[in-house]
Every structure is written in C-alpha cells, then in structure tokens.
Image: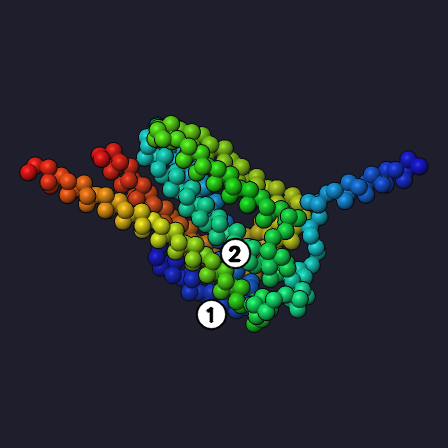
Amino acid sequence: MTAVIIAGFLIPIPDIPILQQSARNLFFHVPMWFTMTVLFLIGLFYSIRYLNDQTLDMDLKAVSANAVGVVFGICGLFTGSLWARFTWGTWWTFSEPKMNMSAMALMIYVAYFVLRSAFNDPDKRAKMSAVYNVFAASTIPFLIYIIPRQLPSLHPGASGNPAFSDMTAPVMRFVFYPAIIGFIGLAIWMRDILLRYMKLRSATENTI
Amino acid sequence: MTLTAFILQQDAAQAVDTLGKAADTKWKALSQMPQSTTIIQDMASHDLIFIVLGVTLIIWLILLFFIIRVDRKVSQLEEKQNQTEFQNQESPL
C-alpha cells in the first residue's frame, strides 16, 4: 500500500504536460473527492452495522471514517478553489453548482460532529449520530453526483461519466488511477490510526 | 399585449434564474491577470505549474495538520496513562 502511495506522488513528475501544466491537478484534486466518497461510504456501512448490533466499536469505526472523510473534503474544496482562481478567474462563484453543493455536503457532515458533541452519554450519542449519518450519507450522491450534472457548469465532467470521458487523456490515466488508489489507501491508513486512538481513549476513560 | 407580457415574464424568469446557466462559457482567468496583484501574476507564469505546487501543498499541509493533531492527542493519553500507573504504584505503600 505504501508503494502505491509513493507512486501516486512520484509518477506525476515525468508525465507530459497537457494544454497547461495545471492539468496535473487532476492527480491531486479529483482523488480527494473519490477518497471522501469512499470514506463516507465506510462511515455509512458502520453506522448501519451499529444500528444492527449496538456495539460502541461500530460507532467509533463510523466516526473515524467520517472524520477523515471531512479532512479530505476540505482538501478538495481548497484545492478546487485555488485551481478555480487561475482557470475561471475567481476563488468562488455561486453559479457553479459543483462547488456549492460540495460545500453544502461538507456542512452536513460538520453538523454530524456538532450533533455528537451535544451528548455526554456514549450510547445515546452513538445511536443519534448513527441515525443522522444514514441521512447525511444519503444526501451525498444527490449533492455531489446528481444535481451538478443536471445543471450547466464550467466544471469539467459535469455531464456523462467524468472518470471515463475523453477529457481524461489516456496518458494521464496511468497516473490518475494509481493516484486514486494511493489516496484511498492513505486515507484508510489515517482512519485506522484515528480509530486506534479512539478505542484507546474510550478504554482509558472506562478504567479511570 | 398579452404576448409582450408573456415575453417580459419570461425575461424576468431568466434574470432570476442564476443557476440555469454557467457564469461564463469561457475560462477567462488568463485575460484578467494583468489587473491582479503581482503574486497572482507570478503564480500564473510558467504554464500554471505553481498552481499544481499550491494544490499539493494545501493537501500536504492539511493532512500534516491532521496527523499532528492526532499525535498530540495520543501524547495526552500517554501522559494520563503514566500518571495513573504512577498512582497505582504508590497506592500499595
């Protein structure tokens, strides 16, 4: 997995430039959103499992996945903003559906953590946040993948399937796909570290 | 009369509808560059390669921040653990 991550970072350098050099951002900006979606899916999976068997372990797994997902979402938003400044001429525009919908999706997930902080009882907190997370995760495909494609936009990949359309040159795919796998691997590793920390914390809180 | 009213209504609807069309059909950032600050002009040079640098730096800094935060939390936990172990050792005496 580490080898894949290293490759995701190293291969872009010898790659040929297309149009403008900023096309290389494809390797960094786009995988952020892929990774975020994967992590939110993991979060959804564990939330549903928590609702099934009510073990706090599942709750921690869901929370750690969502936390890392939000981190990657913020990365994607900021990199997109910087990229937009130099290709579209503005940091932020409200006529761009993809930008605003993804910001909205992130706010829904920030609300998830606000909701969690409102409960002191771990069982109650786990149950409420699991129910909320099922709602939050169900909004993601609509906010990020459906609505932006219904509206005209400057954002590439607004219609059809962005990952497999002709805007992705064949040369770039050799780097693009490992980059996606690399970032997802990195994210899963980060989530694992966070999860181990959370388990330790809950264990020590119980003993002290 | 009714036709003009209808057209007016349509125009109004189009004016209100900001999401119905994209901000512009062209990417016009490069034409705007001369008016912007020197930093932004410098970044737009060399075929926008600095944007790639900026994007990777943003990702790296955010991930680094996240990892450092987790690291701090773990150290706090370790400190707590050491303190309780210390108390446990003292208590039998």
To which quarter of the image does residue B87 belong? top left
Q: How far across and how far down the image is residue B89, in percent?
A: 11, 41
Give the mark, 2 or 1, whose residue is nearer the N terminus: 1
The mark found on residue A14 in the picture is 1
Kindly identify which residue carries mark 2: A79
Q: How far across and how far down the image is residue A47, in percent?
A: 41, 34
Which is more foreground, mark 2 or mark 1?
2
Which residue does the image show at 44% across and 48% down from the upper left? A71
The mark found on residue A43 in the picture is none
Q: How far across and how far down the image is residue B13, in percent?
A: 77, 40
**Badge 2, how many Cα within 10 Å: few under 14, some, many 20+?**
many
Residue A199 versus residue A54 in the image, above or below: below
To which quarter of the image does residue A146 belong? top right
User: Number of numbered discs present?
Assistant: 2
- Disc 2 on helix, strand or loop? helix
Of all chains, the one bearing label 1 is: A
Q: How far across and how far down the image is residue A166, in percent?
A: 60, 57
